[in-house]
């Protein structure tokens, strides 16, 4: 499934520093759809390019959707 970047939204603190970035992805394959929102937080957000934000968000999406080793995978 091709998952497309849908939007990037920045949240700013009192000193105009970036406190978090919300990234939305969307994709579909036939009748199956995926919509997701990922949040990036921490230091250094002000210096990230759009491509770096997208790469970090895709990595985070992979981390949160990959089952942990002790989790059972759903039946096929």
Image (spheres, grey):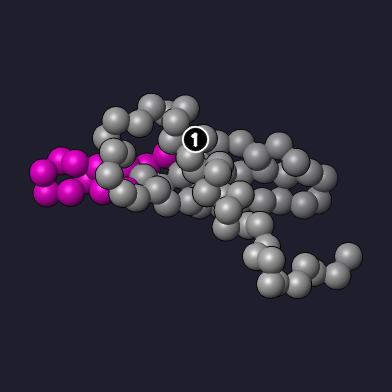
* Residue at x 35% of width, y 31% of height: 48
Q: Is residue 49 left or right of residue 76?
A: left
From this view, report whether residue 11 is shown above or below residue 64.
above
Reply above or below: 46 against 57.
Answer: above
Left or right, 56 with respect to 65, comes to left
Disc 1 element: helix
Q: Position of residue 2 (x, y in %)?
A: 71, 37
- Name, please, the residue furthest toward the front: 69
**Residue bounds of the magenta highlight:** 7-20
- Residue 35: x and y in percent read 60, 51
| Residue drawn at (77%, 52%) of the image | 32
Q: Quadrant of the C terminus?
A: bottom right
Side of 73 relative to 38 (left or right): right
Residue 11 visible to an observer of this rendering: no
Residue occupying image coordinates x 79% and y 69%:
74
Q: Nearer the viewer, residue 74 or 1?
A: 74
Residue farthest along the right direction in this orientation: 76
Q: Position of residue 56 (x, y in %)?
A: 48, 40
Pick whichever, 18 or 71, lies toward us: 71
| Residue 62 pos. (x, y %) | 61, 49
Identify the image quadrant of residue 45. top left
Give the residue pinned by disc 1: 54
């Amino acid at each position: 499934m091709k998952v497309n970047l849908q939007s990037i939204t920045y949240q700013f603190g009192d000193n105009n520093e970036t406190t978090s970035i919300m990234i939305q992805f969307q994709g579909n394959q036939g009748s199956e759809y995926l919509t997701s929102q990922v949040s990036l937080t921490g230091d250094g957000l002000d210096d990230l390019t759009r491509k770096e934000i997208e790469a970090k968000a895709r990595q985070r999406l992979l981390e949160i959707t990959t089952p942990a080793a002790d989790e059972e995978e759903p039946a096929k």
